[in-house]
Amino acid sequence: MLQKRGWLVALSGTALVATLAAAQSGSQQQAPQMTPQQKAEMEAYMKAGSPGPQHQALAAMAGTYDLKIKAWHAPGQPPAEDTGTATRSMILDGRVRVEDVHGSMMGMPFDGHGMTGYDNVTGKYWGTWNDSMGTGLMVSEGTCDAKNACSFTSSWNDPVKKTVVKARMTTRWTSPTVEVFEMDGPGKDGKEMKMMEITYTKK
């Protein structure tokens, strides 16, 4: 349903763009004039689709990183530690940041793929994540401050309980080249615990 709605929005925007182009063309045929409502809708679509400073901030994080990964599986227990690499790049003319991760998790090969963007309509950042240890999708939404410290709320489907799980995620830059990601979510007893910490070091 979300995919269909996205296509409908895109088609509506395309139709308005076509109308504007026709109205501004210098062809011999008289171009149809846009109504005030169409002009207002066109302006809204153009504003929603134009990359801004938030997208520029995401682009500034593009590059290759070394990862140190810590994962906690039970409160009070030491974390499992792994390593990996991450490559971040921008797509869709600077509108979305893509992250591809390769490494190990719990001693097994691990690949992950995430996307992060900023929605001009909602005024919030969004993220998606899927990886080689599952077939589902994690969806996140949150905010970032002027120092690119971010707080997200995420959700995904638990494969054991078959219910939606929610977690809190934060990112912060401890230096111009080091970013720390942390995730807190419910443990087996339902109480919140630290689940993961990843230190990104830019090469």
Image (cartoon, rainbow, N blue to C red):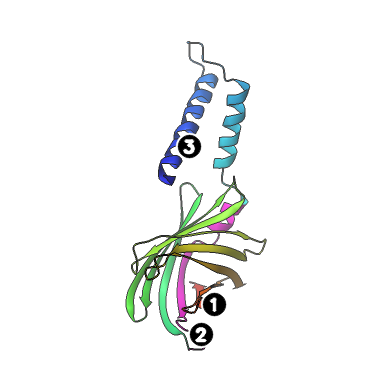
Q: Which is nearer the eye, 158 or 183?
A: 158
Q: Which residue is mark 2?
A: 75
Residue 53 higher or lower than 27, as above or below: below
Q: Which residue is mark 3?
A: 9
Residue 52 on image: x %, y %: 60, 48
Magenta-tinted stretch? 54-77
- The quadrant in which the N terminus is found is top left
Per the image, is 61 magenta?
Answer: yes
Q: Is residue 201 left or right of residue 120?
A: left
What number of labels is visible?
Answer: 3
Q: Which is nearer the eye, 138 or 201?
A: 138
Q: Which amino acid type is marked by label 3? A: Val
Residue 90 on image: x %, y %: 47, 54
Q: Which residue is mark 1?
A: 191
- The secondary structure type at the circle numbered 1 is loop
Q: Which is nearer the eye, 198 or 154?
A: 154
Could you tell me if the residues under marks 2 and 1 are in contact, i.e. CB atoms within 8 Å?
yes
Residue at 34% in and 62% down: 135
